[in-house]
Image (cartoon, grey):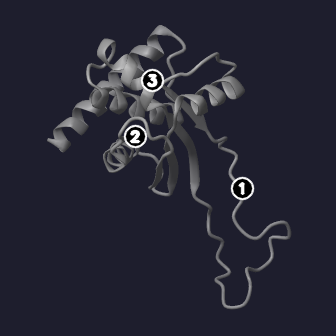
Amino acid sequence: MSVFASDEQSTVAVDLPRWLRLTRLVLAEERAPADAEVSLIFVDEDAITDLNGRFLGGDGPTDVLSFPIDDDHVPSGRQPDEGGRGPGASAEPVDPPIVLGDVVVCPMVAERQAPAHAGTLDDELALLVVHGVLHLLNYDHADEHEAASMQRRERELLDQFQRLES
């Protein structure tokens, strides 16, 4: 699995290696394909407000957004003629990686809501990372049953991560 992380804000300190480990744990525990790719991006309030408005019709900043990539994968092989790959290259087609999507987290919003939600900023960021990655893996909370299932899985994954990190 390949996870790319970027901290594109400077207001709240973000431990990228820690959140990369958590993202990889979620993907592994959810049995994501070995060649799956995910981007984890930490942004400021202006950026998440813009994304929230443009893609979800939301008003104002939010804590986390997930942008799953459609599962219509580009067929392997050379396009458009499906011909060879060039001299010396294997004629065997190579499947492209499976890009699951992007998770965008706003640490400033997380910092504000942490005391009333998860407790600490670290716990809140962990919850948001897990929540966002689960959305990429088709978890949802549109109804009570789905919400309960997603929350239960979040707790299980967070507990497991906490045990591994201590």
| Point 39% across, 19% down: residue | 112
Of callouts 3 and 2, the N-terminal one: 2
Of callouts 1 and 2, the N-terminal one: 2
Which label sits on residue 74? 1
| Point 56% across, 22% down: residue | 61
Query: What is the spatial separation of the Cα atoms under label 3 and label 2, in whole angstroms?
Result: 27 Å
Q: Residue furthest bottom?
A: 88
Q: Helix, strand or loop at disc 3?
A: helix
The residue singled out by tag 2 in the image is: 30
Q: Helix, strand or loop at disc 2?
A: loop
Q: Position of residue 119 (x, y in %)?
A: 26, 19
Of tags 1 and 3, the one toward the viewer is: 3
The quarter in which the N terminus is drawn is bottom left
Query: What is the spatial separation of the Cα atoms under label 1 and label 3, in whole angstroms?
Result: 36 Å
Q: Position of residue 146 (x, y in %)?
A: 47, 17
The amino acid on which the numbered mark 2 sits, given as a three-letter code, is Glu
Which label sits on residue 109? 3
Q: Position of residue 165 (x, y in %)?
A: 19, 43
